[in-house]
Image (cartoon, helix red, strand yellow):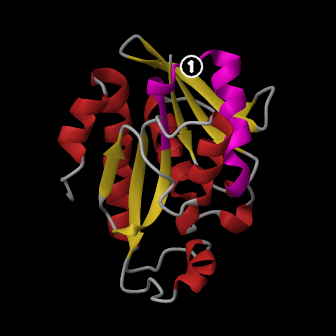
Amino acid sequence: MHCIVGLGNPGSQYEGTRHNLGYEVVDEIAQALKLRFKEDAGEYLLASGTVDDHPLSLIKPLTYMNESGSAVLDVRERYEIPIEHLLVVCDDFQLPLGRLRLRPRGSDGGHNGLYSIIYHLQSEQFPRLRCGIASASTPKDKSLMAMYVLEPFTRQELPEVKAMKQRAKEACLTFVQSGLTTAMNLFNSKLG
C-alpha cells in the first residue's frame, strides 16, 4: 500500500492558506479518484482507493501542523506502510511559487510539520514533495514567516497555485504508479 499525507491545519480559518497546500493537494487527488475523506480510528481523515491496482490511502492529519508526526506514525503502524511508500506533501517557503521538489529523504528544512514527522518516525528516510510558496510577498525577516504561512495566497498568485496543485497531484499519482525516481525525473525541474 502507498500512503500520501497532505500536511495542513484543520478548521475553516486555515482554508486557502499557504500552510494548507498539502491538504489541498490530497483533496485534488481524492477528487480525481472520486474518493471521500472520512474519520478513521486515529487523529486524521482518511480516503482509500486504488490507482491502477495499487492500493492507496490519502491522509489529512487533524493534529495541527506542529504535531503531524503523531498522526503519521499512527497511520504507518496501523496500516503497516513501508516508509518508502509514504509520501508527505507540504508547502516550502524556500522554493519559488510553483516549483515542486520531490526527494527520497532529507532534513525538515525549517518546516515544523516535517520536523514532527522526523521526530515521531525517528527517521529522515521518507519521501516528501515540497510545493513552493515563495513570492514577492515573502517576508525577508524570517521571524515573520510563521504569520506569512498562515496567510491566504494573493489573488495574483492563485493561477500559479492552481497549476502547481495540478502538477503536484500528477506527481503523487506518478509516485504511486511508477515509483519515486520516475516522478522525480518528470516533476522536479518542471514549472509548467
Q: Residue at x 58, y 23 (%)?
A: 48
**What's the residue type where badge 1 is placed?**
Ile
Residue 37 in view (yes/no): no
Instruction: Classify residue 187 as left or right of residue 79.
Output: left
Place residue 127 in its image quadrant.
top left
Q: Nearer the viewer, residue 187 or 26?
A: 187
Residue 149 coordinates in the image, percent (x, y): 56, 72
Q: Residue at x 27, y 23 (%)?
A: 178
Which residues make up the magenta segment? 66-88
Is 80 magenta? The answer is: yes
Q: Residue at x 68, y 32 (%)?
A: 73
Q: Quadrant of the C terminus?
A: bottom left
Place residue 138 in its image quadrant.
bottom left
Is residue 83 positioned above or below 15 on the image? above
Residue that badge 1 annotates? 81
Callout 1: helix, strand or loop?
A: loop
